Amino acid sequence: MDERIYESLMDMIGDAKTAGYTVFVCSAYRSEDRQYELFDEAMSSAIKKGMSESEAYDYAADQYSLPGTSEHQAGLAVDIVPLRQQILNAALGDTDEEKWLMKHCAEYGFILRYPNGREDITGISYEPWHYRYVGVEAATYIMENDITLEEYLDEFYPNHINWK
């Protein structure tokens, strides 16, 4: 991960532990090659389930960022899960650990990157485990206004490039 987020991340995980929640980072930096592997695995799995190549591509693109566009590759994203439940699915959002992280992440400069019900904006399915570092000021604004990073960028940086 980018060294600039390390201290904030460790503070957040430590404070979660102090609050009674044991969480850990299950994924941080991911190379472009690894992103290709994950994307290809998702496509292969979908094809084995009977999807056409085009449908499998759309399915994989919904599950993973396109290689070269992953926030994990930038070193600014981390996947955080409870020690007691490590399967990456929407049910994680119902755990006390993830609820604590969602409530407090902005204090440490992180946002829940792919919130529930915002798939049409982010282009990625709900991921209650995926946190992105944006800095405390931006994170606070995003979380308090219940907007996505895309909406924040549209508001403050209207000429930004949206890779979705």
Image (spheres, helix red, strand yellow):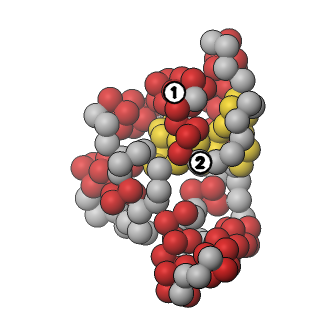
Query: What residue sits right under mark 2 in the picture?
Result: 89
- Amino acid beneath label 1: Lys
Mark 2 neighbour class, 10 Å CA radius: few under 14, some 14 to 19, many 20 or more: few
Provide residue 87's location: percent of width, then percent of height: 69, 45
Check the image and report above or below for 53 versus 33: below
Element at badge 2? loop
The residue located at (35%, 51%) in the rendering is: 118
Check the image and report above or below for 53 versus 101: below
Provide residue 37's location: percent of width, then percent of height: 72, 72
The residue located at (55%, 82%) in the rendering is: 51
Check the image and report above or below for 2 versus 12: below
Find residue 3 and report its image quarter: top right
Along the line of sight, the residue nearer the viewer: 110 or 115: 115
Find residue 49 and report its image quarter: bottom right
Labels in figure, total:
2
For the question of whether residue 143 can be seen, the reply is yes
Provide residue 52's location: percent of width, then percent of height: 53, 87
- How far is mark 2 from mark 1, CA to CA? 14 Å
The residue located at (67%, 20%) in the rendering is: 21
Mark 1 neighbour class, 10 Å CA radius: few under 14, some 14 to 19, many 20 or more: some
Q: Do the CB atoms of the residues marked 2 and 1 lie less than 8 Å apart?
A: no
Along the line of sight, the residue nearer the viewer: 128 or 154: 128
Residue ranking furthest to the front = 50
Query: What residue sits right under mark 1 in the picture?
Result: 99
Provide residue 100's location: percent of width, then percent of height: 54, 23
Element at badge 1? helix
- Amino acid beneath label 2: Asn
Check the image and report above or below for 13 versus 130: above
